[in-house]
Amino acid sequence: MTEQLPVYIKVLFGLTVLITLVWFFKAVKSKSVLIVIIIWTLIQTVLGLNGFYQDTTHLPPRILLVGVFPPLILIAITFFTRKGKLIMNQMDLKILTNFHVIRVPVEIVLALLFSYELVSVYMTYHGTNFDLLSGLTAPIIGFIAFKKEKVNNKLLLIWNIVCLLLLLNVVITAAFALPSPFQKIALNQPNVALLYFPFNLLPSVIVPLVLFAHLVAIKRIIK
């Protein structure tokens, strides 16, 4: 299905995944966390290459059950365990804010995939995906919020909440546009690309890390 894609699109996304991992590691500063993420990425790579997610008859879809739900469970565990809280408290909020710039190349890739009819228009800035704004504003917010000795927590909190809502909008839309028994939208052009490697790493690796970054920032600010 993705054989028609120019190599540069796959390379661009592959580099985006790599930069995501490196950037997140700079924020979390934990080798154990990095190892867990790398192992998870390798597992998802193997599943993607073996066509595991291309079976669209399962309910819930395999990409949600095996690709998305496990990271969400791990995030929940992190928030409710002593070691998890320690890791979150050590994360660099400024790096974590700038980390969201990674959403810019993600949106570019999604737009390219749409042009090849591999994702729904709802997944792009041509449709209802405004997540590009999160990536574009991240360095601006990072500069303004941290330019003084005292962090502008109010600005940081508002921005994280707004961008979290933008992310959730995309995630929910993406779920209903997947080729599956409960597909509700984009019936003529579903999110097929997300079932193939390397693009299965978007919902299974990049999105959970972006979600976690927002949740950590919000928790740290309102504690």
Image (cartoon, rainbow, N blue to C red):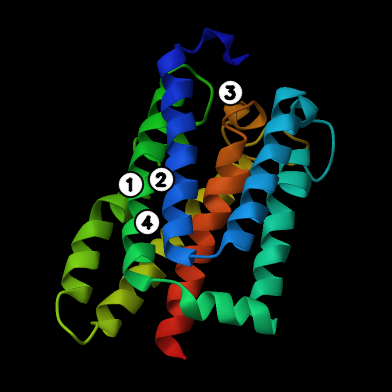
Checking the image for residue 129, the label placed there is 2
Which amino acid type corresponds to the residue marked 4 in the rendered image? Phe
Q: Where is residue 130 shown, x and y percent of the image?
A: 35, 49
| Alpha carbon distance from label 3 to label 2 | 18 Å
Q: Nearer the viewer, residue 11 or 128?
A: 11
Q: Secondary structure at mark 2?
A: loop
Q: Quadrant of the N terminus?
A: top right
User: Eyeballing the image, is 128 above or below 89?
Assistant: above
| Residue 192 in which image quadrant | top right
Which amino acid type corresponds to the residue marked 3 in the rendered image? Asn
Residue contact at pointers 1 and 4, CB within 8 angstroms: no
Q: Secondary structure at mark 1?
A: helix
Choose mark 1 or mark 3, whichever is in front.
1
Residue, disc 3 = 188
Tell me which numbered mark, 4 or 3, is placed earlier along the sequence. Answer: 4
| Residue 79 in which image quadrant | bottom right
User: Eyeballing the image, is 25 above or below 63?
Assistant: below
Tell me which numbered mark, 3 or 2, is placed earlier along the sequence. Answer: 2
| Residue 31 in which image quadrant | bottom right
Residue, disc 1 = 132
| Alpha carbon distance from label 4 to label 3 | 34 Å
Choose mark 1 or mark 4, whichever is in front.
4
Residue, disc 4 = 99
Q: Estimate how packed mark 1 is, as few (under 14), some (14 to 19) or many (20 or more) residues with alpha carbons within 10 Å.
A: many
Which amino acid type corresponds to the residue marked 2 in the rendered image? Asn
Tell me which numbered mark, 1 or 3, is placed earlier along the sequence. Answer: 1
Choose mark 1 or mark 2, whichever is in front.
1
